[in-house]
Amino acid sequence: MTYFLEKCHSYYDDTTVEKIILGMQKRYTSFRVNPLKDKGEALEEIKKHNLKIRKAGIYENAYILENAKEEDLESLDCYREGGIYLQSLSSMMPPLKMDLIPGHAVLDMAAAPGGKTTEMAALSMNKVSITACELNKIRANRLKFNVDMQGASSVFVMNTDARRLDDFFSFDEILLDAPCSGSGTRSYTEEGLKGLGEELVAKSVKSQETLLKQAYKHLKKNGTMVYSTCSIFKCENEELVLKALKGKKYEIIPISFNDDNLELLPSTIDGALTIMPNAYYEGFFMIKIKKLDN
């Protein structure tokens, strides 16, 4: 707990740190309806089982479950058949800021278990070609299972390290939801903060920098990239972006969402978004970058 507090206090004032701690609590379960599979039956089935839901402000297909848990949705046909996908609201946000222009080639660099990958397929109604990379074989198999379950036929899964993609690969759009310390998703308990220390953060930063540099290399000129983490530490976010892209020509495309339940943390890059953890949202960071050089 000491490391987490010291790290937070190095980035935020005392009042903000207190709010962060208060927000590190149990969150509402959220899910999205999958238009590739669902034709209106999912919400009917959910309501039939007396599960109380309401729309989330960020996305027309995003819902909050108010009176039940994940297991209650997992027992329903609409879940087993791919009509809905359990996903945190914060995790739904990066795909919503992708352009997903029909015909575009899209790379998801760290795709498993597939929530964001299949969301992009659903948002584009399978009209963009998505290459989804996952290094770990077991996680890649899980990714493939979810892709098939969700009807995401535009997704090609590669069991490979995105940091070592061949140079001839180039993409119009890239999503890099980078492996991170998870500082924005943890609970404020000894158990919840277990393992969060200098070693994990340093390892995360090293991997993130390599991935971001690689992403930029594979992005076409005038292409766009969304970089995100589930961390609230600036060394994994703003500081990392500025370091990894030093000397490159790029533009920050401002990101914003309209939801009364969404609280933001101060960011040191105009246009970037850092989400305060609360009962609805995990702590999260997002930035959208347009590549201006070759």
Image (spheres, grey):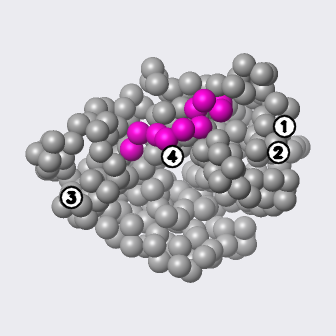
* Mark 1 vs 2: CB contact within 8 A: yes
Judged by depth in the image, the label closer to the viewer, 4 or 1, is 1
Q: Amino acid at mark 4?
A: Ser
Residue 253, quarter of the rendered image: top right
Magenta stretch holds residue 167 = no
Q: Which residue is mark 2?
A: 3
In front of the other: label 3 or label 2?
A: 2
Nearer to us of marks 4 and 3 is: 3
Q: Position of residue 45 (x, y in %)?
A: 14, 49
> Measured from the top left, where is residue 59 in percent x and y?
38, 35
Q: What residue would you read off at disc 4?
A: 91
Q: What is the three-letter code of the residue carrying label 1?
A: Glu
Relative to residue 268, is residue 106 drawn left or right? left
The residue tagged 1 is 6
Would you place residue 102 above or below residue 166 in this image? Answer: above
Q: Is residue 220 visible?
A: no
| Magenta-tinted stretch | 20-29
Q: Which residue is mark 3?
A: 76
Label 4 to label 3: alpha-carbon separation: 22 Å
Q: CA distance from mark 4 to mark 1?
A: 26 Å
Q: Viewed as shown, does residue 157 lie left or right of 17? A: left
Q: Residues within 10 Å of mark 2 (few under 14, many from 20)?
A: few
Spatial separation of the CA atoms under disc 3 and disc 2: 41 Å
In the rendered image, is residue 159 in sight? yes
State which tag comes first along the sequence, 3 or 2.
Answer: 2
